[in-house]
Amino acid sequence: MADGGKPIDAADLEDFIASLEDYQTAIPDQLVQHFLNKTGFQTDDVRVIRLVALAAQKFIADVAHEALTQRRIHRESQSKGSQAIDEEKLVLTTEDLKWALQEFGIRLSRAEYFADQAGATGTGGTAGGGNSGN
């Protein structure tokens, strides 16, 4: 069923599936095929690969939208009555992403070394905590 509650016409569905051959998703075909192969799903049909990529792209967009909404709500609640709120840059944090993923039923646990964690100490500015490859 489509969003409007009525069934999707078979001709429209066929046109959509055929259009996937020419559509380039934000997620490369090789990446999608790699993860499909890792799960045991084998296909060389580019339409199937791009349909999965399109679904993943939609999921990522939905999570990003939820995280952005959470960040805006949090920012507005912290600065009630402030005029400078519209001019500030919006910075998404891991906590915003964590909240958004929880809305989709995904629990995110992160490593202790992320710099945006409360109580983290500055140890050289890298995520690994210092020496960068020596």
Image: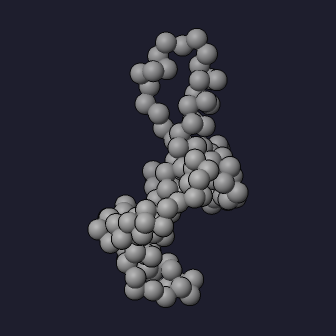
Instruction: Classify residue 18 by image quadrant.
Output: bottom left
Closer to us: 97 or 115: 97
Name the quarter where the N terminus is drawn.
bottom right
Can residue 19 be spotted in the picture? yes
Residue visible at 44% across and 25% down in the picture? 88
Report whether 69 appears left or right of 134.
Answer: right
Report whether 102 appears left or right of 87.
Answer: right
Q: Which residue lies furthest to the left in this view?
A: 22
Picture coordinates of residue 39, whole percent (x, y): 57, 83
Q: According to the image, what is the colour scheme of the structure? A: one colour
The image shows residue 108, relative to residue 50, as above or below, that is above
Report whether 31 appears left or right of 76.
Answer: left
Closer to us: 62 or 75: 62
Closer to us: 34 or 115: 34
The image shows residue 48, relative to residue 73, as above or below, that is below
The image shows residue 46, relative to residue 3, as above or below, that is below
The image shows residue 3, relative to residue 24, as above or below, that is above
Closer to us: 64 or 50: 50
Picture coordinates of residue 115, whole percent (x, y): 54, 49
Picture coordinates of residue 58, whole percent (x, y): 49, 56
Name the quarter where the C terminus is drawn.
bottom left
- Marks counted in the figure total 0
Can residue 113 be spotted in the picture? no
Residue visible at 54% across and 13% down in the picture? 82
Picture coordinates of residue 2, whole percent (x, y): 56, 54
Instruction: Classify residue 11 by image quadrant.
Output: bottom left
Residue visible at 58% across and 47% down in the picture? 4
Residue visible at 57% across and 58% down in the picture? 7
